[in-house]
Amino acid sequence: MTDADRPAPAPLTRAAARAAERAAEQSAPTASRTPTDGTPTSSTPVVSAHDLTRVFRTPAGDVIACGGITLAAHPGELVVVRGASGAGKTTLLNLLGTLDTPTSGTVAIDGEPVAGMSDEQIVLLRRNTLGFVFQDFGLLDDLTARENIGLTLRLRQVDARERDERVTEALALVGLADHANQRPEELSGGQRQRVGIARALVGDPRLLIADEPTGQLDSGNAASVMDLIASLTHSRGLAAVVATHDPAFVSRADTVITLQDGRVI
């Protein structure tokens, strides 16, 4: 059975419980919005950017990678950022994910400006609130799927028993329960990306940032990964920002932002 043919796994008890807790926290009756799938979300965005600009200084002159971008992603909302190569998608995601610093403008996570955070606070933010999915998978070749997924929890010093339980859940969530002990070289591209998604989700993040997550996959595996990200965003109440070239991702999005030369068009 290929990844594309694999049926979506049923929601897990622990994951469903965490999603329910989030929904309860975000259920203020006067503060809600509704994305295209009809799922209510909080009016407070998980991540927001205002007039975000990133300029790179070069000997040939200034390069505006992002110019005055304003956006927000709420719980349960899938935001797709599209544009040609060099449009500024990766730069924007790096800024939203605190991996880069804007030249001007602001980024806020859960309403708190990142600019006011210490280095230690930013490290903890990345570890506890953000989940990253990369185009090249970002897996360690010498580790099994289970070990790659568990790295996030090891950094948090989660005890071994709980770590094992959560990794097992994450593997089942992405349909890889039978591949836990395989190394990346023993997995297909689609399976490796599912490991990357499980690693991003095992820490129970509020914001998922994915940079071209289907860029190295064939059409069947790409569709499977797209469906998985969209489903998990809505079922777990995540905010997700995904950069992509793939027009098929647009139909799964709640919000679409198109970039050209670093600006929204």
Image: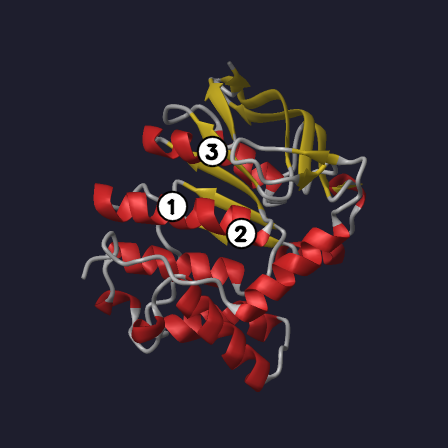
In the picture, the quarter occupied by the N terminus is bottom left
- Which residue in the rendered view is the most extreme toward the left? 1
Up the image or down, 51 lies above or below 116; here it is above
Q: What element carries label 2?
A: helix
Q: On the image, numbered disc 1 is attached to which residue?
A: 227
Q: Could you tell which of marks 2 and 3 lies nearer the N-terminus?
A: 2
The residue shown at (53%, 46%) is: 234
How far across and down, in percent of the image, does residue 5 sit? 23, 54
Name the foreground residue: 109 vs 173.
173
How far across and down, in percent of the image, does residue 45 sit? 70, 38
Q: On the image, numbered disc 3 is attached to which residue?
A: 253
Indicate how the structure is coloured in the image: secondary structure
The residue shown at (60%, 71%) is: 155
Q: Could you tell which of marks 3 and 1 lies nearer the N-terminus?
A: 1
Q: On the image, numbered disc 2 is attached to which residue?
A: 235
Q: Is mark 1 on a helix, strand or loop?
A: helix
Up the image or down, 64 lies above or below 7; here it is above
Which residue type carries mark 1? Asp
Q: Could you tell which of marks 1 and 2 lies nearer the N-terminus?
A: 1
- Mark 2 neighbour class, 10 Å CA radius: few under 14, some 14 to 19, many 20 or more: some
| Residue 33 horizontal side relative to residue 244, left or right | right
Which residue type carries mark 3? Ala
- Mark 3 neighbour class, 10 Å CA radius: few under 14, some 14 to 19, many 20 or more: many
Disc 3 to disc 1, how far (Cα)? Answer: 10 Å
Q: Is residue 218 visible?
A: no
- Mark 1 neighbour class, 10 Å CA radius: few under 14, some 14 to 19, many 20 or more: some
Up the image or down, 153 lies above or below 249; here it is below
Name the foreground residue: 205 vs 100.
205
Which residue type carries mark 2? Ser
